[in-house]
Amino acid sequence: MQYMPTLAFQAVCFMYSAGLGFALAIVYDLFRIFFFILTGSDKKQVILRDIIFITVWLWVNFIFLLTICEGRLLLYVFLAQAGGAFVWFYSLSDIAFLPAKRAIKAVKRHFLRQKDCLCRVKGRILNIIEKIFKKSHKTVKKYLHIRHNIVYNFFVNLLSGSFTKKKRGDGDVSKD
């Protein structure tokens, strides 16, 4: 068992961790784009995005340290990850994020136009259906009230008070 890692091992860990930091910075920008699509702003839901990213970073870093660095916690590995992320954020991040933001806004505008068109069509269809229901409701009410012996009319008339029950002895008695 070696207590001191060799220079080649250190160089491999350093280079891989710099690449991992660069890749995790790209993943963070993908989270930014995803949350920008959901909320429409880059500044909303920052805490949730950061918590999700830190969870992903911790898990990936744990696996990386176990596999590549043989379970050793090395300071230069974390510094190389920070350096890789620094290179991404201060060189290519704005170049990648701004066109994505413009594309997302263009797609949203397109879908909003489609939504407006669909809402107009839906409104027209609902107006036609409403007219049909109003007309059919009037005709049904008209034909139901023509026949007085239908159960519907009996209850309508009963509730309105037009039918009154006759009591015994209240018949047509004509006095002579």
Image (spheres, grey):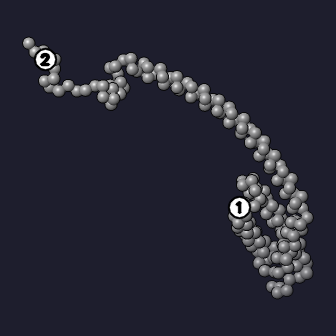
| Camera-nearest residue between 29 and 148 | 148
| Camera-nearest residue between 133 and 176 | 176
Q: Position of residue 73 (x, y in %)?
A: 78, 80
Question: Dividing the picture into quarters, in which one does residue 92 lie?
Answer: bottom right
Find residue 95 and name its label: none
User: Callout 2 environment at 10 Å: few (<14), some (14 to 19), or many (20+)?
Assistant: few
Left or right: where does residue 114 sit relative to residue 124?
Answer: right
> Looking at the image, can residue 100 be seen?
yes
- Quadrant into which the C terminus falls: top left
Residue under the image location 91 percent in, 81 percent down: 7
Left or right: where does residue 169 sit relative to residue 15?
Answer: left
Kind of residue at badge 1 = Gln
User: Callout 1 environment at 10 Å: few (<14), some (14 to 19), or many (20+)?
Assistant: some
> Looking at the image, can residue 155 be seen?
no
Kind of residue at badge 2 = Val
Residue under the image location 17 percent in, 27 percent down: 167
Q: Which residue is mark 2?
A: 173
Instruction: Judge whether 60 appears above or below 130 on screen.
Output: below
| Camera-nearest residue between 92 and 106 | 106
- Quadrant into which the N terminus falls: bottom right
Residue under the image location 85 percent in, 69 percent down: 85
Instruction: Judge whether 102 appears above or below 87 on screen.
Output: above
**Mark 2–mark 1 contact, CB under 8 Å?**
no
Which element is circle 1 on? loop
Q: Position of residue 117 (x, y in %)?
A: 72, 35
Q: CA distance from mark 2 to mark 1?
A: 86 Å
Q: Position of residue 78 (x, y in %)?
A: 82, 76
Q: Which residue is mark 1?
A: 45
Residue under the image location 45 percent in, 22 percent down: 140
* Residue found at the very far bottom of the displayed protein: 3
